[in-house]
Structures are given as structure tokens and as C-alpha cells.
Image (cartoon, rainbow, N blue to C red):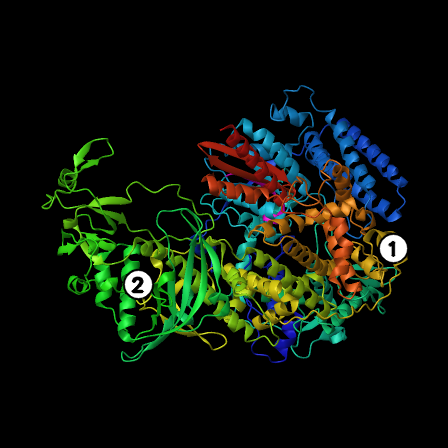
Amino acid sequence: MEFYHHQLYSGKSDLPRIFGMTASPIKTKGGATDVSYRKAIQELENLMHSKVYTCANESVLSEFIPFSTPKFKFYRHKEIPYALYEHLTKELTILKDKHQLSLKILDDEAAVESMCKKIMKVFSAFEFCLGELGVWLAVKAAKSFSCNAIDHFLWEKPDLLGDRIVKNFSLDVCTKFSAFLPTNPAWTIGDDVKGNVDAGLMTEKVLCLIESLLEYRDLNDLRCIIFVERVITAIVVQSLLSEFLPKHNNWKTKYMAGNHNGLQYQTRKLQNEIVDEFRKGMVNIIVATSILEEGLDVQSCNLVIRFDPSATVCSFIQSRGRARRQNSDYILMVKSGDLSTYSRLEKYLGSGEIMRKESLSHASLPCSPVESDLCDGYFYCVESTGAIVTLHSSVRLIYFYCSRLPSDEYFKPTPRWDNETCTLHLPKSCPLPAIHAQGNVKILKQIACLEACKKLHQIGALTDNLVPDTVVEEDDAQETGSQQYDDEQPSYIPVEMVRPFIPKDASILYHCYRIELKQNFEYETPVHDVVLCMRSELDYDIANLKFDLQVDRGSLSVSFKYEGVISLNHKQVMVSRRFQITLFRMLMDHNLAKLREDLDGLDLGENLEIDYLLLPATSVDQRPFVIDWRSVTSVLFSCEEYEKDHINCSLPKYLHTKDGLRCACMLKNSLVYTPHNNHVYCITDILNLNGNSLLKLKNGRNIPYKNYYEERHGINLWFEKESLLNGRKVFKVQNCLLRCKQRKERESSNMSVELPPELCSIIMSPISLSTFYSFSFVPSIMHRVESLLLAVNLKRMLLDHCTQNVVIPTIKVLEAITTKECQEVFHLESLETLGDSFLKYAASQQLFKTYHNLHEGLLSAKKDKIISNAALCIRGCNRKLPGFIRNESFDPKKWFIPGDNSTNKSIKEEYLFNTKKIYISGKRKVKCKRVADVVEALIGAFLSTGGEVAAVMFLDWLGINVDLVHVPYERNFAVQPEKHINIRHLESQLNYSFNDPSLLVEALTHGSYMLPQIPRCYQRLEFLGDAVLDYLITIHLYYKFPGLSPGLLTDMRSAQVNNDCYARCSVKAGLHKHILHLSRHLHKHIAETIDNFGKLSSESTFGWETETSFPKVLGDVIESLAGAIFVDSGYSKEKVFESIRPLLEPLVTPETVKQHPAKELNELCQQMHYDMKKPVKCSGRGQTSVTIEVKANGVTYKHTEKSSDKDIAKKVACKKVLKALKQANSLN
């Protein structure tokens, strides 16, 4: 507040105004007088420079918030039988002395003293439970302590023996006390509660609680909070109620307590889950310490019991306020004859009215100035902002700063004050060395903290507002992640495919490309080549394009060949457009009405339009002509025009059609329309059948064709003796780019039909069935061409920025913008994996060498601002990348037929980042992550073809400025490495000799090693090594196994690059023996890991076989060692890989890789259409349970797994369900 008041009295007018809410502005313990209340309220108002306001009376509030009814419950104080109490306390003392004596075998005096204090703390808890709650509850307390590890000081040297002694003490107490419980196995504490009180198994106070609860046994929906003073009381009372209440109702009880005492541990997540269960009615009673007095709003809570009286008026008012339901009760348990407590509680009941009266009576008075400690000269002020830290506030600020430093489950960074040397030791991730203080002995610690604040600000670790820099970085990252992203993004059309209006009298030049088609399968209908006419010359990569289509019967090879330039007049362009519109409309939807509508509006309009031609090519014997104009003009079929050229007809036979008499040669190789069934057919032959010929039906019956048409269609044939036509249904246009297309074994029996000529109307003639078959593949071919042209436009935009000659194949760019949803033979996943690893490496090494003093937490926050999906999406959108992204499977129905003006209305002009033109055909949804994926894939495309220099250029184009130049690592401290580690042994193991062995020490030092001789821990090197190793392994896999299917590289990388893999390598190499740490919990976890390591498969270090969790520290040191070698070798990635690779052997291969069970199960369920439910997660007492459930073929497969690591629990649960499914499938 000194910052605020300093600004206030200097005349600043733009200071923030304070608004706060509290149940009680007073925190006094006793029932204070009106004057003391007035003074306390004024002090609060002056400190906050605010006024206290409240309602005129309680009745105003009661209209909106129900108030509970206070009820006093008096219990008779009756101690447990004296002889029993004396005997048990004597036994308890003997056990305490015995176990404290056993600690003497420890060498460390400080550790012995610490453990003795903890035994005393446990002893006091047992003594309290015995006297205040009874023998049975004291037994429960002993069991609780024997099952829960005791916390320790983070800088204290761990000792598993000391921990065992504390647990053994609790077990011995449990055994001694249990001997005085009834021995009947069927006995329970709830059998005879009054008899149990007489026997000393519970006290009158506990009995009073039970009786108070039973008064509400008829309440349908009880929600009760029982407030106690001690954590141990909460634990044992919960045990009592859980055992006693089921005899009377189905109430469920849980306890909640804070973690400040170090004796029991509840995570914040577990506490939130308990509160949530209480809200939902799954838990009826919570036994809680003061942790629940504020911040909990459960409107259904209808009973609050104060097992222990409130210590302050604030506690009293807050706990009473938890009962929010109408007609709720607030029970105050008081010992009979305790007039002092009763009087205090009575005063608490009236305190609310006094505070209200005092607040209202002085509401109009101004606030008075606050006494400041700035006058003593001990403060530090930031001139630019006016921010101030004083002796008093400096301690809090240092603790706050340390709390934002990187931590793990084994170490929470805090400052440590050494009284003997008057030195403030800060955690190793803090860039400051130890601070020595001189001066007034009483305030030496504050002086040191103030000096530390000053220096932290000077090096930038505290901002000009004296806030930890981590807070600012995290806020910035959060702001980046919370920026609104519009997933409605444009869909681009290449500029080569769109041309504006051309005058009718002008000739148009087209570049002609022969699309050569080759069938790699046998089929009665052959394909022939197609000519693509473009208004501009295609990029070399497309002009020489070769690829395969996956069609029904096999593969179709496609290759492009440039034929030259051709000039077409207006008439030729119009007939060409009419041809392709007619042909494609018949292929795609057979809609004659829509075709007529399209052809009526056909013109070279003034709007932007897709302008290229797709025409049948001539055969070899017709060269040098390229375009088969005879087939093109089939769209202009007219009987009169046809008759002029009708000479030497090989079929001098006339047949009756819907259009009149036509020569048979006009019908053969024509496209006809049959109005009776609204179908179109290709006529391939004139049959030796007529209306009187017999047709064999599916049911085996034979009837004449004329009878069939009469029965089926109600048509009487007039010319039954005329030859029937062989009509072939028009081919369907399909997506031939799919990677998993189902092959058709044989032709459908209903593809060909026999048609009476009189039912047919000619649409096109002459045109072959081969033309229709060939053109049925063209939409897929042109979709690939369009995609490649998009990639060309994107490539030009990217290369415009490059100062060096970078060659990148167009197909690589296309791969980078093609998502998995397209379902094609390639997609971006492999390039994305490659790009992601390079980006992480490039950013990490840049940050590491730029910010020598920043800790890992800040480096990670800065890195996230560069490489997070949100950040990459913003950069991608700024460069207009979303329009290039292909995120949908090709749908032929949505394909733009070139020249069809009805589909060109939405084409709009757009300018790219390099001011070049592109066109927009509309909008579609593109997820933020997809944009980020494409950015990473483009990095991978540049990296894989142009190397790291090209990838860095692309990053620069994105606005990410990095370089790969080595910068010496500044280390302004001296370490004597040989005193801490066995350097020669480690160098031999790593096959690397360090130029600076202190880097090796730093790489093996955990944050808990709070000794001044080593000023840094491994976190910075781990940050760097993590990125270096990830990148090295990824590029090794990418180049060693070229041509991996998309997704396999990702699976291999995931299997090899993970903490469990590194941890196993660390243990195999014995590196755990060299880690410098002072964490008892870590020591214990490593010991357990080593004990269990022999049970694990030693064949590989990668994969997902492990069903237990490893300490993260074991994996961290592999990464920190990689970082140390990288720095020491002058940023030599080769040296790092040579050194670390042997530790990781054998590396994963395509043959040995296994999918993560969760991914494999998910893919199996998708493939087999099984119903997989969302995983159910529950946490409690340091364990997470994950339930995986799959319903397959009417059978439910379900498994629940528990582990301290939620990822391990999920992995094992998926593995078990997967195994059950596979077994069931093999049986079936």
C-alpha cells in the first residue's frame, strides 16, 4: 500500500479506486467495545483510502439472503477415565523417547533436530486426540499419520530412514492404543455410543456432535459443514462419521483442510472436487478447518456446526454465512460452565449490528493520512513509475518473486535466510548471487530483501512496476492466446485460372497441354488424352506433372506435355465452352434442365470468370492437330447440318427418334436423353434386337421388350420392329484422389440397357464413350492442378522475400498446405512434425543466447509467444496463408465447371502479402490450429529442401527473427566441478570431453540443491537441450527413413522423444547416481524407480510399454546434458548426437514403432464404428483414476486405472481396453 499512498499524497489523480467485499471488517478475537470497533474500521478505511458501506439493517439483506438461526448446544465436560489416560500418555511418552533416540544414528545434526521436532508435533497431536476426542479417535489419528508422508524443508538433506522412524512411531502408537479397543471383530464405534463415552473411547464433545446431527436425520437433503480448529480433528471426525452414520442414513462425509501444517496434503484440485460434490449432493457433510469459512457459496447448505468455537468475530460471521438455505441452523457447541466462551460468542452475535452502526455513523467523514515507513530512508523507488518497495514490503515481494520461479513436484523455490552469516540465499533459477546484509541486527533480513528487490529491478527481473517479469510474460502470452480468431476464412482460386472480360472481336491465345492418360488395368472402355488450354503458361513443375489417380479398377497414370500456343476466335471459344459445360453437366448431375439454363446464359461476360478449356485430344494418326474438333462440335448437333456431310454412310438405315427419322450412324456414338425415365445414355451400338425380342428379367421370366416397356413405363412402342440401341449409362464423376479408394471388381449389370430409338432424343453426336470415360477423371485431375497452382502462387509469395536462391519443389509446398481431412496420398503431418521441431530448436537457441540471465520459466514463456498455435495462427493470418489451406476432401459436385457463368458470381479479387493478385471463390471454416499446422509444415518444406538457411529465411518472412550463429555462454561465477561430480567417469560415459566442466555440474544440479557453491541449476540447459534433442531425433528419423507415410514420423518421434524414454535411458546409464539434489521426495521416488526398473523390459528405451511413472528429473538430465554439450561444443549438433545417441539406443524404426494405446484405440473405434465414451477422470489423495469405456457390437469394454500420473493412468486403461477388444475380435 505504500506505493498507493505515496502516489496519493503526491497529488496523482488517476489512481485506481478500491472496491472490496467482506463479511466482517473486524478480525478481533474478543468481544470488543463500540470504541474499539470504531477504531478498527477507521484504520481499515484509512489504509484502503476507502469507506465502509453496508445496509441500514439486517432485514434489508434478509430479503435477498436467508440468515441461519443460531443455536447453542451445551455438552458436559467429562474426561476419559484417569487411569486409562495416565497409562496411555505414559506409553506415548515412552514411544516418543524411543524413536527420538533411534534418530541419533543419523549423521546430520540438523536433520536429527528437524525430525525430533516432527515427532514432537505428531506426539502433541496424539496427546490432543486422546484427551479431547477419546481413544478410538486417537487410534484413527495414529493410522492416518502412519499412512501419510510428512513434509520437510525443501533445502534439508533427505533421509528415508528418518521418514521411516516417524512412520514407525505412528504405527507403534496405533498398536498400543488399539489394545484398549474391544476385540470382538463385529464391534463398531456406533454400537453403544454412551457406553463408549464411559469407556473413554470417545468424549462427551464427540457425542454432542453425533446427537446434534441425528436431530436432522429426517431432513431429505442435508448439506452440513462442521468447522473444527485442527486438521487432525477434521480427519478423525470424518472417519468417525463415515463409520457411524451409515447405520442411520446414507449421508456421505468428507474432510477438507489447508496444507500449511505440513502433516496432511490435499491438492487444490481435490478440494475443488469435494466442494463440487457437496454442491451436487454427492457429499452431505464436510468436516473442515477455517479453509471453508470464506469463498464458498453453496446455496443449498442448510446446517453449520461449530465443533470448535470461532477464534475471531470475522471467523464467526463467515462460518455462519455458509448456511445459505432458508430455515438453516447455525449450531454453536459450548462446554457446560465455560462462561467465557459463551459470553464471547454472545458478543459475536451482536457484533454485526455494532459494526453496521459504527460504519454508517462515520460514512461521511474523510479518510486520514496513513503513517508511512518511507521516512526512515529504507525504501527503493522506481523513478519512471513511482513504484516503491519498503523494508516491510520487500520480504513479501521476494517471496512472491520466488513463487513465480520454475518449480517441480520435488522443489518449490523460496528464499532462505542464514542467521549465522546474515546472508539471503535465493533459488538457483534466480540470476542474483547470495545477498549479504549489514546494519541493524533486528532488520537485517529486511535489509537483504530490500537490496535483492533493488538488484532484481536493475537487471529486469522485476518490472518498473516492481512486478516479477514472469507475471508480465504470462499475461502477454495469455493475451495472445485470447485474441479473437475468425474461423471464416477465404478460399483462393489461382490467378492462372481466372481471366476478365475479352472483346468478342479479339482472338484469344491459349497455351495447350496434352494430359496423357494411361490405364494400368484392363477394361473394355479405353481412355484417351485430354487437352488443357490455359490463358497463361504454367510453371515448369506443373507443365511436366506426373501422378497417379486411384480409380475403381486400379490406377490411372496422368502426365502433362506442353504442345504450344493456339489462337482461338470468339466462335471457337464459345463452342468449346458449350462442349465442356454440356459434357461435365451430363457427367456430374445428368440435369438437362440445368444444362439448358446454363447454355442459355452462355457468353463471354464482363465478370471475372474461370477461363480455361478442357477438350478431347486427337489420336496419334490425327497429329499434328491437337484438339479433336469433331468431338467438340458434337455439342452443336443438328440433323440438317449433319445431312450435308452424310455421304458414303456405312449404316444406310433410318430409325425413328423423338426428333424424327435419323440415320443409324447419327445414333451410334451419340449422347441421348430418354424423357420416360429422365436419364441420359451413351449409344455405343445398333443391336440385332427389336421390340419383339425377348428380355430376360431378374426373376428368370422372359418377355418381349415391347411388353416390358408397357408394363414398366406404360409405353406402347410404335415401331417395334426397329433395331434397339445399346445405351450405356453415363459414368459418375468421383474423387480419384482418395488414398484409400475401394476397387470395383466387376461392372454393374445395369450399366447397359437396350433402348427403342423412338424413346431417344439426341443431345451430342458424334461423341464416343471413351470421351465420357476419359473426362470423368478430369475434375480430379484439375483439382490437383488447381491445388498445385495455389502452391505455385504461395511459393512465389514466399520466394519474393528470399535474398538467396532457394529452390523448393511445388509439390512440397502443396504437401505443406494439404491437411489430413483431404484424404489424399500425402498430407502435411510429416512436414509439420519436422517444422515444429526446427521452430522449437531455432527459437530456443535464440532465446538462450539472447537472454543469459533469464530463468527457464521466462524463456519458456517467451518461446510460447513465438511457437504457440495462437501465435503462429496470428502470423499466418497476417501473411494471408489461410486462403491457401486445403482442408476438405475434393467434392466433384462442388467443382467449378470452367466457363459456366452461373458458378462464377462469387469470384472476388484479393491482393496477397506481396501485393500480387489472387481470387476468392467464397469462405469456409479453417480452425486456428490448422493455420498453425500449415505454418509449421511450410517451415518443414523449406527445411527439407533448402536446409536450415532456407527455413530461417521463411521464419524471417513470418516475422520470427532468429539466427543459428554461436554466441559464447556468459558465466560470471567460478565452480570447482571436481569437488561435486566425477568428471572423468561422466565424460567417458558421454564420450565427450568438456572444455568447461562447470557446464557438466550445472547440467546435473537440481533446483533443490540449495548450496551456494553451485549458483545455477540445470533448468536453462534443460530448456535448450530439450529443443536440440527433439530436433536432432526428428531430422534423424526424417532423413534415415525417407518416404514414410504421413503420420508415421509423428508416431516414431512421439515414441522416442518423451520423458519416460529419456528417464529409462538415464537409469540404464546410471546417471541418477550423479544428480545433485536435496529433496527427500525425489530421493525416495528415484529409489522406488530403481527397485522397479529390473521388472521393465530392457529391450528398448522407447515406446509406451511402461505402466509406471518415472521422476521427471531423470529425463530432464538427459536434456540438460544435451544442452551442456551443445553449448560447450560451440553449438555443434553433431557432437550432441554422437554423445547422446548411444544412451538412447536402440532408436525407434518403422518396424519397431508402436502407436500410443490411446491413439490406437481411437483409430480402431473410428475404423470399426465403435462407440467410445469420453474418458472419466477422478483425482484424490495424490492419485488419478481414469476410466475408458468402449461399446462394440453390443458389448461394453471398460477399465479403470489409478496412478499418480494421469497420463500413465490413461495409457494403461486404453491398453487394457484395446487388448480386450483385440481378443474379442480374434474370437469372432
Residue 1050 lies in the magenta-colored region: no
On the image, the x and y values in percent for residue 675 come to 17, 51
Between 583 and 1044, the one nearer to me in the picture? 583
- Element under label 1? helix
Q: In this view, does 1133 lie above or below 313?
A: below
| Distance from the alpha carbon under mark 2 to that under mark 1 | 77 Å
Residue 283 among magenta residues: yes
The image quadrant that residue 395 belongs to is bottom right
- What amino acid does circle 1 point to? Ile
Q: Give the range drawn in magenta.
A: 282-292
In the figure, residue 786 lies in which quadrant?
bottom left
User: Mark 2 or mark 1: which is in front?
Assistant: 2
Instruction: Report the amino acid beneath label 2.
Output: Gln
The mark that comes first in sequence, 2 or 1, is 2
In this rendering, does residue 71 appear at all?
A: no
Q: Position of residue 743 (x, y in %)?
A: 42, 44
Compared across the picture, whether 92 is left or right of 526 comes to right
**Which labelled disc corresponds to residue 580?**
2
Q: Which of 458 and 3 is in front in this view?
A: 458
The quarter of the picture where the N terminus appears is bottom right
Q: Read off the residue under disc 1.
A: 983
- Residue 483 is situated, as x and y percent measured from the top left of the image, at 51, 65
Drawn side of residue 533 relative to residue 38, left or right: left
Question: Residue at position x 36%, y 60% from top?
Answer: 895
